[in-house]
Amino acid sequence: MGTFRIAVLASGTGTNLQAILDGLHGRDGIEVVCVASNKPEAPALERAADAGVETGVFARDDHGGRVERDAAMADWLAARDVDLIALAGYMELLSGQFVRRFPNRIVNVHPALLPSFPGLDAIGQALEHGVAVTGVTVHFVDEGVDSGPIILQRAVAVPYTRDRSQLEREIHEVEHQLLPEAIRLIAAGGVSVDDRDRRVVRVEHPETAGDG
Ligand code: GRF
């Protein structure tokens, strides 16, 4: 079996990138081949460099706009022959052209149980709404905001103290498990999308059977 080549896009601290590097990179035929960011100062880039992974910076201002930047980034990723693009705290909406170029090949981790609380500050939205349970979703990216086919979800109870930093900690811990888990399933051929209803179908596969 050939290598399963992953690219990661990140804008921030990159703890989800780190979970991918620690849990998946160089194991079971999975390689993180490159990391791209829209923010030149993103600490995620340092984590990639420390792991010996190639990095690229695609700031909107250097490319005359979001669509042009996304086109340059898509060319860069395509030239590296990536099988999957993982958004790990990538804080910009990808253009339709970018998304259409990699159909069912982009995944995102979102800190809520979608379709509840899409978009920015999902944890704040959950606290504001007063829900007792929220969680984490890993989904394929389509042209909407956090609206693509759902791959994995895991619930997290909101602490009765409603303490934001505790909830953030617990959600991030679950993110660090769920995103690598979803990528591992995809790499093993255990996930496909039914194009009739845009829902994920889990495929029984010798390597994934018995999982989660
Ligand atoms: C995560 O909570 C992710 O769900 C959200 O942004 C955060 C990124 O954190 N979209 P990190 O950069 O991976 O540490």
Image (cartoon, helix red, strand yellow):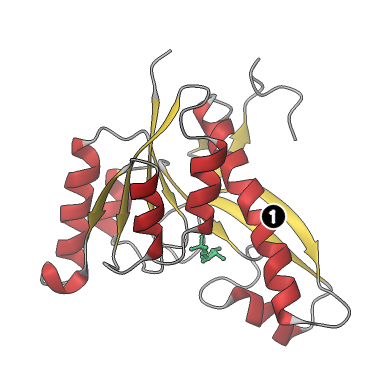
Taking the view exactly as shown, the residue that stands out farthest to the right is 160
Label 1 C-beta lies within 8 Å of the nearest ligand 1 atom = no
The kind of secondary structure element at disc 1 is helix
Task: Estimate the x, y position of residue 133 in percent, counting from the top left.
Answer: 81, 68
Q: Residue at x 33, y 52 (%)?
A: 99
Q: What residue type is labelled 1?
A: Val
Q: Which residue is drawn at 50% across and 50% down?
A: 18
Task: Estimate the x, y position of residue 37 in percent, counting from the top left.
Answer: 31, 60
* Residue 42 higher or lower than 109, as above or below: below
Q: How crowded is mark 1: few (under 14 residues within 10 Å), some or many (20 or more)?
A: some
Taking the image as shown, residue 122 lies to the left or right of residue 43, namely right
Task: Estimate the x, y position of residue 75 in percent, counting from the top left.
Answer: 17, 46
Which quarter of the image is occupied by the N terminus?
top left
Q: Name the residue under label 1.
A: 174
Is residue 49 in sight in this rendering?
A: yes
Task: Estimate the x, y position of residue 32 in percent, counting from the top left.
Answer: 39, 37
Residue in the foreground of this view, choosing between 59 and 141:
59
- Residue 44 location, quadrant: bottom left
Taking the image as shown, residue 80 lies to the left or right of residue 165, namely left
Taking the image as shown, residue 147 lies to the left or right of residue 117, namely left
Which quarter of the image is occupied by the C terminus?
top right
